[in-house]
Amino acid sequence: MKNEKCKIKNEKWKTSASSSGFHFSFFIFNFAFLQQSVLDPAGPQAARIGRLWWLMFYVEAGVFVLVGAAVLVAVFRKRKERKKSSDEPDTSPEPKRERRMTRVVTGGIIATVLILFVFLAGSFYTGRALYSTDDERALSIKVTGHQWWWDVEYDAVPASDTVRTANEIHVPVGRLVKLRLTSTDVIHSLWVPNLNGKKDLIPGHEIVLTFQADREGEFRGQCAEYCGYQHAHMGFKVVAEAPEKFYEWMNQQRAPAPEPANEAEARGREVFLKGPCVMCHSVRGTNAAGRVGPELTHLKSRTTIAAATLPNTRGHLAGWVTNSQEIKPGNNMPPVPLEPGELQALVAYLESLK
Amino acid sequence: MKTETETLAVVEEEEEEVAAEQEEGEEEEVREGDLPEEEERRLLEKTWGDDPGFWGWLTSTNHKSIGRRFIITAFVFFLLGGVLAVLMRVQLARPENTFLGPDIYNQIFTMHGTTMMFLFAIPVMGAFATYLVPLMIGTRNIAFPRLAAFSYWIYLFGGITLYAFFIMNIGPDQGWFSYVPLAGPEFSPGKRVDIWSQLINFTEISALATAVEVITTVFRLRAPGLSLHRIPIFVWAMLIMSFMVVFAMPAVMTSSLFLTLDRLVGTHFYNAAEGGDPLLWQHLFWFFGHPEVYIIFIPALGYVSSIVQTFSRRKVFGYTALVLSMIATGFIGFGLWVHHMFATGLPQLGSSFFTAASMMIAIPSGTQIFCWIATLWSGRPRFKTPLVFVIGFFFIFVAGGLTGVMQASVPVDLQLHDTFFVVAHFHYVLIGGAVFPLFGAFYYWFPKFTGRMLSEGLGKLNFWLLFVGFNLTFFPMHQLGLNGMPRRVYTYPPGTGWGNLNLVATIGGVVMTLGVLTFIANVLISRRRGRVAGDNPWGADTLEWSTSSPPPSYNFQRLPVVQGREPLWVRTEDAPVVEGLRVDCREVLVTRTLDAEPDNIMALPSPSIWPLMLALAVTPTFIGSIFTPWALPAGMLLAGGALIGWGWPKPRDERCERKRVEEMTDEERRKEAARAQ
C-alpha cells in the first residue's frame, strides 16, 4: 500500500504545477496554472458567475476596508473631552452628537440596502442567463452517481447507439451540454469549477446542469456532496475537444470491444469472462453485461482509473484488480485473487480495450 | 417614577401584612426585615444554599451551580472538538497523507461538527443565560429550577454517550448534517447514525428546557421597574435565542425521529424507492439548521453589547435599533434555510426568494455593527481584554458576513457550496461571531463567577494567538474553495495545488491551539492568584454587578428596584428595594410581563434529586431504543416513576406552598382595595 502511495506522489502524473513553490496568492495573481479554478472560466456559464463574483468581491472589499477603518478610528481616535480620565459613565450623551450619529448610522443602513439591491439584481440577472439556455441542439448526457464513480451515458436515437462510459465526459467545444443528473444510491454533487457551478445527484430526482466549453482542454471535476467513505476519491474529467475529434471519439466508443489480438489477450478475456468481473462490469461484444460497476468496453481509451484517482497504466490496473481495497479502501469492488499468469493475461486484455 | 412609588407602596403594604399575620399568631414565618441584617443573610443562605456535601451537588437547583457546570462541561466539549479539529488539520496538511484513514477521518469530522454545534455552542449560550439572566433581571433563581437541573444532566449524559460510542470506534460517520440516503438504513448499517440521532434528542431536550426557563424567567421574574423596554440587550438576546430554540428544535427532532423510524422500524419517510424523499430531510434539517446559526450568534450579540457599553463608558447607542435588529434577525433566520439547498435543483423563482431573504439578514447585522461603532466612537474606550476580543470580533465577523452575502446569490453559491470557501465562511461567522465574543464574555464575567480577575497580560496574549492563528487557519480556505477543494474529503491528490495552503492552515491551527492553552493557563492561575475583583470591577451597569462576586446563593439580599435602562449607572442614593419576601422559603417576586409591576409571590422548589433520576431514566431509554423499540415502553415506566417522584409533595416545599396560597388571597384582596380607591 505504501509503495502505491509513493508512486502517486512521485509520478506527478497530473499536468499542473503543485511543486511550483509557495503560492499564497489570494485574489492577486491569476489562477491559470492551477488545475481547477472558479475564476478561470472555460465557458460562458462560469464566466458569468466569475463576473458576478468579482463585482461582489470588489464592492465587499471596499465595505470591509471602510468598516474596519471605522472601527479602528472609533477606538483609537484622540479625544479631548472633559471627562477624559474619569471612569464616570455617560448616561445622557449630548443630544446633538447623538442626532449626528443617528444620521450617519442611517446612512450606513441605506447604503447597505442599496448595495444588497445591486447584488440581488446582479444575482437574478446572472441566474436567468444561466438557466434560460435551453437549446434544442444541446448535447444530452445522463450522469448517474454511484459510490464512488460516475456512470456517463450519451443519449442517442436509436437507443442502441447510446454510448456508455465512466468518469470521463467528452464534450465538443462550443456546443451546449445538458447533463441530466441522478443517483441510484446516495446524494452526490457534480462540479467542474472551470465550467459551471455544481448540481446535486439525488435518488428519485433528475436535475439538469448545463454548461458549454469554449476552449479545448481537460477540466477536473469531483463530487462535492459528502457521499461516504471514499467521497475524497470521486473525481472525473471533462475533456473538451474540437467537434471533429469529439465525433471521432464518439464513433470509436460506439464500436464493440476489439477482439483479442494475441494469445495473452485471448486468455485474459477468458479469465475476465469466467471470473467474478462479469457480475458487475460490461464489455460490449462479449457476454459481460453487468451494470453495477463502470463500463469497460473502451477502458484503455480513458486516462485514469478508480474515478480519476490513478493514471490508467498497466501497473495500476494490475494493482487495482488484485486488491483495490488497498488503494481506495471501502470501495465496492472485492479483491480478485488470481494466479500471476492469469493476472498478466487479464491486464493484457484490459489494456487491449482501446 | 410612577413605578417606583407604586413599588414602594407594595413594600409598605407587604410589611403591614407581615405585621397583621404575626398578630394573628399563625405559624412562625420569617420575612425580610424581621431579623438583623447579618442574621437575615445567614438564614437566606440556609434557605437558598445547596444541601451540604456530594448529595447537595447532585441535588442542586441553584441557577449558578447549574450554569457553572454547564459552562465547564461545554468548555470540555469545546476542547474535545478542538482536538478533533487539530487531528483533521494534521491529516490535511499534505496531499495523500496517511495519518488518518477514511473511516476514522469521517468519524472525526462528524464528531467535530456535532460536538461544536450540539455539545458546545448551543449549551454554552444557554449556560451563560442560566447563570446570568436571573442576576441581570434581579431575582433569586431561574424559573423552573428543577427543569434547569434536568436540562444539565440530560445534556451531560447525551455527550458522554456520544463520546463513549466514539471511543469504541463506532462513532457516527455520516456528517453532522446526516443527509439521507447516506444516513439511511441501506447505506449506513450498524448503529452509528442512531447514536447521532439520539444525541440530537438528548441535546434538544436540554436546549428546549433551558429556552422555556429563560423565557419564563425573563417574562415573569424581573425586578420591579425593569419594564420590557429597559431590560439589558444581553437579556433581550437570550430571550430571542430562547424563542428561536422553541421554534427551531422541533424541526430537527421531527427529522431525527423520522430517521430513527426509517432505521429502526422500516418506515420510508426518506426512501425515494418507496415514495419518500431524501429532500424532505434537507428541508426539515435546515429549517432547524439555519436558525441554529442565529441561536448561536444572537447571544453573542448580547455579550458584545454588554462589553461595548461597559468599556466605552457610555450607554449603548441605538438601544431600540439593536433590539429590533435582533428580533428581525430572529424572524428572518427562519426564512433562509433553502440557501443550503440551492444545488438540489429547486425552481428558479423559489430560490430567488431565499436569495433575497438571505441578503436581507445583512441589514439587521449591519445595523448592529454600525450602532456599536457609533457607541465606541462617542465613548471613551478602555482597552481591557473583553473589549479587545470584541474588536477582533468586528473584523472577523464582518469578513464572514460579507462572504455570506456572496453565497446568498444562487449562481455564486453553486460554485462555492460544499467547498472549503464555505468552511472558511462559517468559521469566520461562528468563531468570529460567537467564539470571540464568548471569550470576551468569559474575561468580562469571570470576576463575577469567581471573585477574581483574569490576568490582562495573558488575556492579550490569548487574544493575539487566537486572532492570528484563526486567520492563518481559515483565510487560506477561501482560496482553496475557489481552487476547487470540496469539503469533507479525508485527503486530496497531489497536483491539485492545494497542498501549500493546507499546510498554512494547519500551522494556523497550531497557533490557535496555543491560544486556547494560554486561556486555560490564565483561568487556572487566576482562579487562585488573580486580583480580587470586588463587586463591580469594570464599573458596569447591569444588576449582576451590584451583588458580591461570586454572588451569594440568594443573589440579592433585597431584590432591587430598577430606575432606568442602565440600572447601576442611574441608581439614586435612596433607591428603593423590595422587602417582605419570606426568608425561610425560596420566595421570588413575580412581576408583570410588560411593565414589571409586582404581580404575585411564588415559592420556588428546594433542592431535589429527581431531575437527576429522570435523566437517569431517560438516558437508558434513548440508548436502548437504538437497539429495540421495546426500550420505549420500558423507559416510559422508568421515566413515569421519576416524574412521580419529581411531583411528589415535599414537606419543606409544602410549608411554603400553603402560605403562598393564603398570601395570594391577601394579594388579591389588596389589589381589590387598590382598585377600589
Image (cartoon, coloured by chain):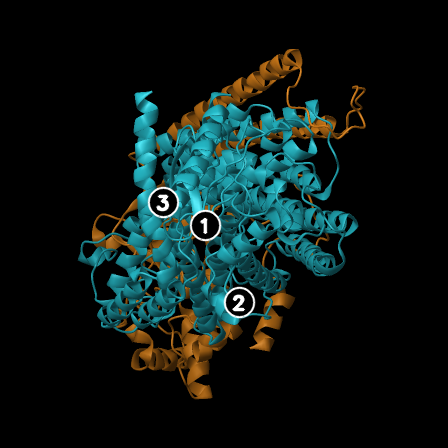
Chain colours: A orange, B cyan
Q: Please name whichever residue, A97 or B227, is drawn nearer the observer in this view of the structure.
A: B227
Q: In the rendered image, which residue does mark 3 sit on? A: B24
Give the image quarter of residue B400.
Answer: top right
Q: Nearer the viewer, residue B33 or B602?
A: B33
Q: CA distance from mark 2 to mark 3?
A: 35 Å
Q: Residues within 10 Å of mark 2 (few under 14, many from 20)?
A: few
Quarter of the image with the C terminus of chain A is bottom left
Q: Are marks 2 and 3 in contact (CB under 8 Å)?
A: no
Left or right of residue B463, residue B677 in this image: left
Q: Chain of mark 1?
A: A
Up-down relation of residue A289 to residue A104 (above or below)? below
Helix, strand or loop for disc 2: loop
- The type of residue carrying mark 2 is Pro
Q: Mark 2 — residue?
A: B52
User: Residue at horizontal 49%, vertical 53%?
Assistant: B63
Percent across and percent down for residue A154 are: 31, 50
- Report which quarter residue B516 is drawn in: bottom right
Which of discs 2 and 3 lies nearer the camera? The answer is 3
Residue B261 in the image, given as x and y percentages of width and height? 24, 62
Residue under label 1, please give it. Answer: A238
User: Residue A94, how many percent across, how many down?
Assistant: 67, 15
Q: Are marks 2 and 1 in contact (CB under 8 Å)?
A: no
Circle 3 SS class: helix
